[in-house]
Amino acid sequence: MSNIVLYELPGCPYCAKVKQKLADLDLEYESRMVPRSHAKREEVKEVSGQTGVPVLVDENNDVEGMAESDDIIAYLEETYGDAA
């Protein structure tokens, strides 16, 4: 089981950007699909304090509930990319 978890929604372009970066960096992760309705995204809200996706959790680096695709991509590159 991976220590990286991505909360996502099928068809979400922001989620797709993060998934592409995870693939580019050859990182294993657990995908957790969330309901379409924001009102039913209790797990995402518990983790991140909001209901939007994508949300990243990285237990290896004590990252709990990072939101915003650009922030996630920058974090992944900095932490796992060539410069890391």
Image (spheres, rainbow, N blue to C red):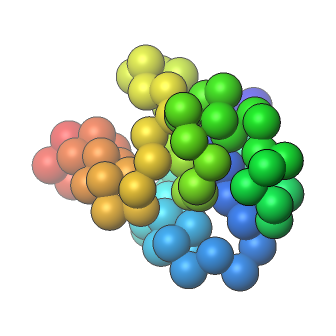
Write down the quadrant of residue 37 in the picture.
Answer: bottom right
Q: Residue 18 at what x, y percent from top left?
A: 49, 64
Q: Nearer the viewer, residue 79 or 16?
A: 16
Location of the N terminus (image quadrant) = top right
From the viewer's perspective, is residue 41 above or below residue 19? Answer: above
Q: Is residue 41 visible?
A: yes
Write down the quadrant of residue 46 in the picture.
Answer: top right
Q: Is residue 38 left or right of residue 68?
A: right
Residue beneath the point at 64% across and 76% down: 12
From the viewer's perspective, is residue 15 above or below residue 43? Answer: below
Can you name the residue that lies furthest to the front here? Answer: 39
Q: Is residue 57 left or right of residue 30?
A: left
Residue beneath the point at 61% across and 29% down: 47
Q: Nearer the viewer, residue 62 or 14?
A: 14
Q: Is residue 81 visible?
A: no
Residue beneath the point at 75% across and 34% down: 43
Q: Residue 53 at what x, y percent from top left?
A: 59, 57
Q: Nearer the viewer, residue 76 or 42?
A: 42
Residue beneath the point at 15% across and 49% down: 83
From the viewer's perspective, is residue 10 above or below residue 40? Answer: below
The image shows a total of numbered marks equal to 0
Q: Residue 74 at what x, y percent from top left?
A: 26, 55
Location of the C terminus (image quadrant) = top left
Q: Residue 75 at what x, y percent from top left?
A: 30, 46
Q: Nearer the viewer, residue 45 or 14?
A: 45
